[in-house]
Image (cartoon, rainbow, N blue to C red):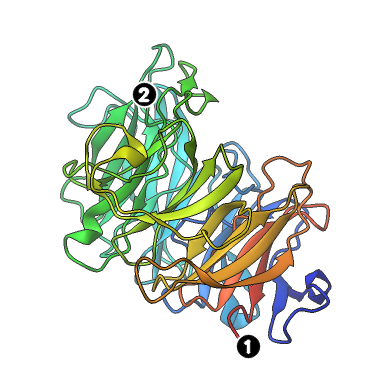
């Protein structure tokens, strides 16, 4: 990795350092902010080459997932070799990388779940789906580029298209894989509104809490019979739910759906807690807020009007917030976010959670301008933190080619 002090503002604290992690002939990127990519000691994580901030091309022979060893100067080691590798996730104990090989087409092909030791040893095929899922008439295709794993490492979830390529308004579904092999795969949610699900297992260590999955529902979205998305939502926008991984306990998060507040599309659990954070676009004030809430009983798709919903607007002390992509450390005490300037520049900021559940974020700090080209749609910085909160990670095309970066010394005086 290469020190990039030139990316820091002139008045940056002495402890703040920026490192370029990749310098490749093809675009390189971190996985999406919500992905489980780190070992628990914060020393190694997974990123990918020949990729963009929202995924990769299943037919790209150059695409590879890489292990970045921060303890060894940011050394990069390929961990996948197959064309079509997608949706990588690291086991909670940090020993194993799970990923899929996507050779699907709507109504056909093959989707394979594999795992490999994070040291590159013991590659193993766990499950091959080349026909209808048992108990269902559907065969999955177009797997979502992110998978998610339970905090006990026993179950893995991914969403996929379930259409045959010819049927209008076909369903998408949430697939649960039993990594202990008792019931290889089952579908717990399905329907046409689940086209951009963003499934995220709770990081809770509680026996019951770890079964929860955060999901996004896109009402009014449009897509082709082949599952290609045309519009993500209708006029009322998306809403966010939690569901237990056995398909029960479907609940609401009290966000959006009132014609003024809209869920932007990114949400995540606050560390290991039972609460989650969303980014909202608020039309009448022209701002993008961060709001924390806990799941409450389902009361229809009414968003913020859900009875009993507790909402804490975390960004309420920020003047004209434009916060789009964000993540916390594993303890849920620190946060990193982008903040979009009026000219499209993506600035990075950190903040800390207050001692009380009703407190706003505090101790806001400006880190740097990621220098992403505003005209290049989709080249998002997508910042996130290491589990210990000591390092932040972002994407930038400042070199002319999208690459992966790290910033350290975030919370030091």
Q: Residue at x 31, y 52 (%)?
A: 156
Q: Quadrant of the N terminus?
A: bottom right
Q: Residue at x 37, y 46 (%)?
A: 199
Name the spot of residue 410 as percent of width and height, x first.
61, 78
Observer-nearest of 413 and 171: 413
Q: Residue at x 53, y 68 (%)?
A: 385
Observer-nearest of 197 and 23: 197
Task: Read off the residue under disc 1.
Answer: 413
**Secondary element at tag 2:** loop
Task: Read off the residue under disc 2.
Answer: 192
**Secondary element at tag 1:** loop
Q: Residue at x 63, y 82 (%)?
A: 409
**Are there few (<14), some (14-19), or many (20+) residues within 10 Å of tag 2?**
many
Quadrant of residue 21 within the rendered picture:
bottom right
The answer to whether residue 244 is seen in the rendering is no
Q: Earlier in the sequence, mark 2 or mark 1?
A: 2
**Are there few (<14), some (14-19), or many (20+) residues within 10 Å of tag 1?**
few
């Amino acid at each position: 990795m290469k020190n990039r002090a030139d990316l820091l503002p002139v008045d940056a604290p002495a402890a703040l350092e920026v490192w370029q992690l990749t310098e490749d002939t093809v675009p390189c990127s971190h996985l999406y902010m919500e992905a489980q990519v780190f070992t628990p000691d914060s020393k190694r994580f997974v990123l990918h080459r020949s990729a963009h901030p929202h995924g990769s091309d299943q037919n790209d022979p150059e695409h590879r997932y890489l292990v970045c060893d921060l303890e060894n100067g940011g050394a990069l080691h390929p961990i996948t070799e197959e064309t079509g590798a997608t949706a990588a996730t690291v086991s909670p104990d940090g020993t194993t990388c799970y990923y899929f090989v996507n050779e699907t087409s709507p109504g056909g092909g093959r989707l394979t779940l594999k795992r490999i030791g994070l040291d590159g040893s013991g590659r193993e095929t766990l499950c091959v789906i080349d026909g209808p899922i048992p108990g269902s008439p559907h065969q999955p295709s177009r797997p979502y580029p992110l998978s998610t794993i339970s905090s006990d490492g026993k179950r893995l979830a991914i969403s996929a298209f379930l259409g045959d390529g010819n049927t209008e308004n076909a369903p998408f579904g949430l697939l649960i894989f039993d990594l202990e092999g008792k019931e290889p795969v089952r579908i717990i949610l399905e329907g046409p509104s689940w086209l951009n699900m963003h499934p995220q297992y709770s990081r809770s260590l509680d026996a019951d809490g770890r079964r929860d999955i955060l999901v996004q529902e896109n009402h009014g979205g449009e897509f082709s019979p082949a599952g290609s998305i045309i519009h993500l939502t209708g006029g009322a926008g998306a809403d966010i739910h939690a569901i237990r991984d056995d398909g029960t306990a479907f609940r609401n998060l009290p966000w959006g759906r009132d014609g003024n507040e809209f869920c932007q599309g990114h949400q995540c659990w606050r560390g290991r807690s039972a609460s989650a954070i969303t980014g909202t676009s608020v039309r009448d004030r022209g701002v993008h807020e961060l709001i924390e809430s806990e799941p409450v009983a389902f009361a229809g798709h009414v968003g913020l009007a859900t009875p009993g919903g507790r909402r804490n607007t975390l960004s309420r002390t920020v003047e004209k917030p434009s916060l789009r992509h964000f993540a916390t450390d594993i303890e849920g005490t620190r946060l990193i976010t982008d903040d979009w300037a009026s000219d499209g520049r993506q600035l990075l900021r950190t903040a800390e959670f207050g001692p009380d559940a009703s407190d706003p974020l505090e101790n806001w700090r400006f880190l740097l301008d990621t220098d992403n080209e505003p005209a290049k749609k989709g080249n998002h910085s997508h910042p996130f933190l290491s589990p210990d909160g000591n390092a932040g990670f972002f994407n930038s095309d400042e070199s002319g080619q999208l690459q992966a970066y790290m910033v350290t010394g975030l919370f030091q005086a």
